[in-house]
Image (cartoon, grey):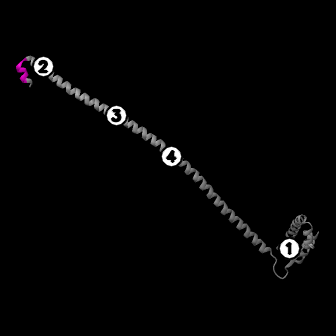
Amino acid sequence: LKLLLFQASPRAYYLAKSDAAIVRMQGVAKETEASVELSQRSAQLAAQSARDVLDATERIDATTAQVDGQKTVVLVVSIAVSALALLVVLVFVTIALVKLVHTNSLKRKAQSVPQGENTVILFTDIQGSSTLADANAEEYRGCLLLHNEVVRAQIAKHKGYEVKTQGDSFMVTFHTVDAGVQCAMDVQV
């Protein structure tokens, strides 16, 4: 096309050159337009990416808050379970100690229980206690508590063994006659 225009007239050549420039400028304009569209699309994508990052950050913050709340719940539950476990251990230790003390107490009592031909049995009773109790029940209860305290102190002093009590009566055993008689005398003083 250029050759044909050049042969027709020199001016046509220049027009053709300017047309070529226009065509080139149209191409550049199209490329620029495509670049602008591409830039606008990139800007839109960048804005969308920024919104996505912001949304993700908000979701992360919400998840972090939820996890923190769950951590708090787990911590509280852990403390409660630990306290309960400690309480259970303490209960079992207490039960074991009570059984041990009770067993040792029974062993000591069994060892101190008089046995054999020389065993002495002492029975005590407050004479006329029913009449005293009927006359003044409150005062009698106080006297009975004092009586039981005195009798038990004398039993321990003379190394006797309290077999049983019923009302105001005691059944006690001793290893020797002297210990039983001395206890009976000391209780009456």
Q: Which residue is mark 2?
A: 15
Labelled disc at residue 170: 1
Q: Quadrant of the C terminus?
A: bottom right
Q: Amino acid at mark 1?
A: Phe
Q: CA distance from mark 1 to mark 4?
A: 71 Å
Q: Amino acid at mark 2?
A: Leu
Q: Which residue is mark 3?
A: 44
Residue sitting at 50 percent across and 47 percent down?
67
Element at badge 3? helix
Pointer 3: residues within 10 angstroms few (<14), some, or many (20+)? few
Residue 161 shows in this picture: no
- Measured along the vertical axis of the image, is residue 74 above or below residue 30? below
Q: CA distance from mark 2 to mark 1?
A: 145 Å
Q: Amino acid at mark 3?
A: Gln
Q: CA distance from mark 3 to mark 1?
A: 104 Å
Element at badge 1? strand
Contact, mark 4 vs mark 3 (Cβ under 8 Å):
no
**x and y, in percent, of residue 175 in the image:** 85, 76
* Secondary structure mostly seen in the magenta stretch: helix
Q: Which residue is mark 4?
A: 66
Residue sitting at 63 percent across and 57 percent down?
86
Q: Tag 1 or tag 3, which sits nearer the N-term?
A: 3
**x and y, in percent, of residue 70 in the image:** 53, 49
Q: Tag 4 or tag 2, which sits nearer the N-term?
A: 2
Element at badge 2? helix
Q: Amino acid at mark 4?
A: Gln
**x and y, in percent, of residue 129 in the image:** 91, 71
